[in-house]
Image: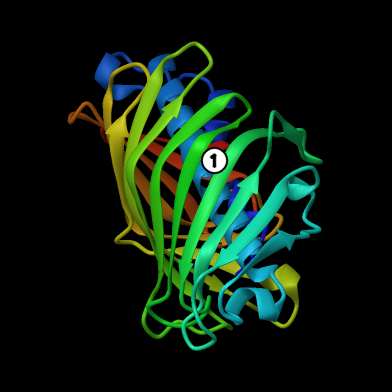
Amino acid sequence: MNLPKLFAKIVSLAFIASIGILSSCKEEERLTAGDTQDISEEALTDSYFQDTDDLGGIAIESPEESQYNGGRTSGSITITDDRFKCATVTIEATGTTENPQGIITVDFGTGCIDNRLNTRKGKLKFAYNGRRFQPGSTVVMTTENYSINDIKLEGTRTSTNVQGSTSDAPKFNVILANGKATFPDGSIAERESNITWEWIRAANPSEDYLVIDQKSTAYGTTRGGRSYEVSLVEALKYKRFCGIAVDGIKRYLLDDEKEIVIDYGDGTCDKAVTITVNGVTRNLNVN
């Protein structure tokens, strides 16, 4: 499945860096510069891992039918998406027509720059088992010296087609285990996540939207050493061309004590959000 490119850029909170610091008399009742950096970097790391899901979906849709499920075969794959324009993509199929299995390797070499000036290096490997829209089918992503914009990503990301999923509204549960992002200065952010998302496809692709299930969670340690947990008070909804979520509520808990809640509104495609820090609320427009 080709997750829409907009949805693969889910940096839903990176904009907070431009909001500035909310003033208040008490440290625990305001959004500090450290909070801003931690939340923005968590969102950035999340978006980069989401990008690997999108790359995997595109790669798995791209082989010829005979390559994908025609039994044991190997060869190269041509993909038109600009993120693959200088990458070498190969497939090694080991399954059968009834049960396609195999590994697709995407090799970005020493540097592949896409049209949005993102630079990817190294390899991504996608081990697939079953047809893409078949309930119960899986894709397991691993990395080999892979980085995007000089942030190295590691970990195992397992995507499972959820029972009842269809090609019109495909739904996947994605678990990231042992996730790690190493920044250019050597600092490390660790991440684990369990996310379920559904792609609602419309007759007009511009009306497609993505829903992140309310039960989705993530946790880890920021590069500054702070622990964090991410949960959803309400499911998040993303529309094409809107950039940030248009509906839903996301909750951060930093160092087990500081709660930051972002409310994205009522479905309107705008830049208005409400941020609450330990009970203190501000209405803001994102630049």
Mark 1: secondary structure: helix
Q: Position of residue 103 (x, y in %)?
A: 53, 60
Give above or below for 3 relative to 259.
below
Judge the density around disc 1: few (<14), some (14-19), many (≥20) Cα neighbours within 10 Å: many
- The amino acid type, in three-letter code, at marker 1 is Tyr
Q: Position of residue 160 (x, y in %)?
A: 39, 68
Whether residue 3 is visible here, answered yes or no, is no
Number of residue marks: 1
Task: Quadrant for the C terminus, please.
Answer: top right
Left or right: where does residue 277 sit relative to residue 66?
left
> Residue 121's spot in the image, x, y percent?
64, 33
Report the residue that reaches farthest toward the left.
Answer: 256
Which residue ends up furthest to the bottom in the rendered image? 98
Q: Is residue 107 or residue 194 the one in the foreground?
A: 107
State which quarter of the image contains the N terminus: bottom right
Q: Which residue is drawn at the image coordinates 22% and 26% (left, top)?
A: 255
Res. 109 image quadrant: top right
The residue under the point 43% across, 33% down is 42
- Residue at 59% of width from left, 25% of height from top? 18
Asked if residue 24 is positioned above or below residue 14 in the image, the reply reads above
Name the residue: 36% across, 82% down. 163
Q: Is residue 159 left or right of residue 26?
A: right
Report whether 232 appears left or right of 102: left
* Residue indicated by mark 1: 48
Residue sitting nearer the eye, 147 or 223: 147
In the picture, measured across the screen, residue 217 lies left or right of residue 188, that is left
* Residue 193 showing in the rendered view: yes
> In x, y percent, where is residue 189?
38, 26
